[in-house]
Image: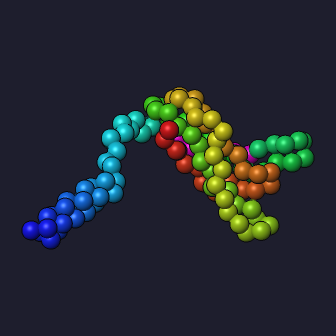
Amino acid sequence: MLKRTMVTLATAVLGLSALAAAPAQAAPVAQADPPTGCVTWIEWLHQNPNTHWYGGGNVQCDTGTYQAKVVCYDRKSGLGYVAYSGTTVEAPAVAVAACNPGHVAQSVHVVPA
């Protein structure tokens, strides 16, 4: 009888510990609609009259809140990296991201906020 009670108690404790260890389900987070009607372009940047580089990335959308992401390339080292705009903007404002001086912008992308 004592053995049976101990087995039942151990089973109950193990069952409760498994439930406590299970990850809690997070409540679904409402996602804003992605920006629509977006246009991206790359432009020349000027640091002074003698320093110019093709390294600015711009995004403008008709709706939504977003940032700009530009994929940059350092021609000397051959390394690529990503730069983001410093602020989040609301349509129809232009979000601007810049590569480091002398580095080339390869593509520009919209990052929904």
Identity of the residue drawn at 64% across and 41% down: 85
The residue lying furthest to the front in this view is 2
- Asked if residue 72 lies left or right of residue 93, the reply is right
Asked whether residue 106 appears in the rendered view, the answer is: yes
Prevailing SS of the magenta stretch: strand
Determine whether 56 is above or below 23 in the image.
above
Q: Is residue 40 magenta?
A: yes
Q: Is residue 50 magenta?
A: no
- Asked if residue 26 lies left or right of residue 63, the reply is left
Image location (x, y in percent) of residue 110: 52, 44
Asked whether residue 38 appears in the rendered view, the answer is: no
* Residue 56 quadrant: top right
Identity of the residue drawn at 37% across and 39% down: 29
Q: Nearer the viewer, residue 64 or 14?
A: 14
Q: How many marks are shown on the rendered structure?
A: 0
Image location (x, y in percent) of residue 47: 84, 43
The span shown in magenta is: 39-44
Colouring chosen for the image of the structure: rainbow
- Asked if residue 43 lies left or right of residue 50, the reply is left
